[in-house]
Image: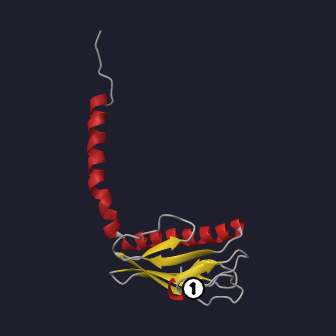
Amino acid sequence: MATTRDAGFTLLEVLVTLVIMALALALVAPRFGDALPGVELQAETRKVVAMLRHARSKAVLLNQDIQIQLVEEPAALSISTEDEPYRPPEHIRLELSAGRVSAAAEQPIIDADQAIRFFAEGYSSGGSITLSREDGRRASIHVDWLTGRVSTDD
């Protein structure tokens, strides 16, 4: 009776291959951010858009005014009802340009040049936030004063 060896891989061979692939991925993955700088800027822009939309929804839901302001150096965005501000990566710069404040506002904005307010009725003071990288790439986020709608330049 002749014995034939089964075709395939041993468990050891599969494990060694997986370890080599994991090491290669661990070395290559951090470089994707450097290779695709626009992707990181888009991701950070989406985070700020989500934060602004969350603040507007929270203002309507809680029936109270909520303010987004630019704080500290390096710049960070803070929601008046949250403890931790949003901090972008060090190489991304934030700029906030506030719009007009409605006469219907019951409380004045802390610093009209550095804040966007969402009112309980759903509208806002308006304004824009610009994220920029050192390489010149920029993304702008706009808040409509009448509707409180948050949009990007995409």
Question: Can you say which quadrant of the picture contains the N terminus?
Answer: top left
Residue in the picture at 61% in, 67% down: 54
Identity of the residue drawn at 57% across and 72% down: 52
Asked whether residue 108 is in view, the answer is: yes
Of the pair 112 and 25, the residue shown nearer to us: 112
Residue 4, compared with residue 120, is above or below; it is: above
Q: Tell me the quarter of the picture where residue 44 sits.
A: bottom left
Q: How many marks?
A: 1
Q: Residue at x 29, y 15 (%)?
A: 3
Task: State the residue at coordinates (27%, 30%).
Answer: 12
Q: Position of residue 37 (x, y in %)?
A: 36, 72
Residue 33: where, in percent of width, then height?
35, 66
The image quadrant of residue 29 is bottom left
Q: Is residue 8 left or right of residue 102?
A: left
Q: Which residue is mark 1?
A: 127
Which kind of residue does numbered mark 1 sit on?
Gly
Q: Secondary structure at mark 1?
A: strand
**Residue 83 x, y percent position in the rendering:** 50, 64
Q: Is residue 10 visible?
A: no
Image-based side of 46 in relation to 17, left or right: right
In percent of width and height, residue 126 lies at 61, 85
Q: Label 1: how many residues lie within 10 Å, few (<14), some (14-19) or many (20+)?
A: many
Q: Quadrant of residue 132?
A: bottom left
Of residues 45 and 74, the one nearer the viewer is 74
122 lies above or below 28 = below
Q: Is residue 102 above or below residue 7?
A: below
